[in-house]
Image: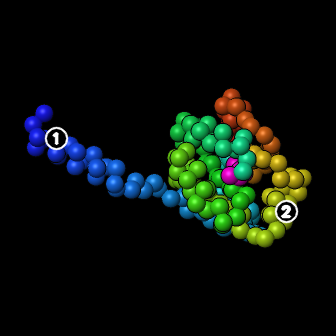
Amino acid sequence: MPRKTLIICHFLLLCTIALPIRAEQATLKPFAPGSYQQLLDSNANKPFMLVIWSITCSSCLKDMALLNKMHKNRPEMNMVMLVTDDASATEQIQQILAKNELTGLENWIFADENPQKLRYEIDPVWYGELPRTYFLNKSHEREGISGVLSQDDYETLFKKILN
């Protein structure tokens, strides 16, 4: 390889390494008292899935790749993400969402000192187990499921709420 070409290649390699790669940042809406109704209102007459997760929930983190796959396979399915951590975890939340290509979804973050109050507003019989996923049809009749779901589970529930 000629010396000039080698120098150019070396320079380009250094530039690639030196330039920070900036992943798309998610807009994290603050989830406070009244936000659940706001979420329902903004999705009036539309089915959607509400995924509730946390950076400390290993099952939630393992599920992110499948959520990304489901989002790509079913773009007509409106997915809304709600992280139960507070603003002090924003950097980690952003990294997880970017890594799993979920920054383009509607993303919310708990923003109240009393997380129990927020959980109760979403569902009075939900005590905080994660992951928690709600499937809401266009009338906002819903089904809440705690735990990890398979791709088949998602597909079955999507069909149920999209009809």
Q: Residues within 10 Å of mark 2 (few under 14, many from 20)?
A: some
Q: Quadrant of residue 40?
A: bottom right
Is 153 in front, or is 77?
Answer: 153
Residue 141 appearing in the image? yes
**Magenta-colored segment: predominant secondary structure:** strand
Q: Quadrant of residue 117?
A: bottom right
Kindly identify which numbered label has been placed on residue 94: none
At x 34%, y 50%, the residue is 17
Residue 160 appearing in the image? no
Q: Position of residue 146 (x, y in %)?
A: 80, 43
Q: Secondary structure at mark 1?
A: helix
At x 53%, y 47%, the residue is 99
Residues drawn in magenta: 51-55
Q: Does 160 sit above or below residue 54?
A: above
Q: Position of residue 138 (x, y in %)?
A: 70, 49
Mark 1 — residue?
6
Mark 2 — residue?
116
Q: Position of residue 151 (x, y in %)?
A: 66, 31
- Residue projecting furthest to the front: 3
- Could you give the CA–CA distance between mark 2 and mark 1, rounded to whole angstroms? 61 Å
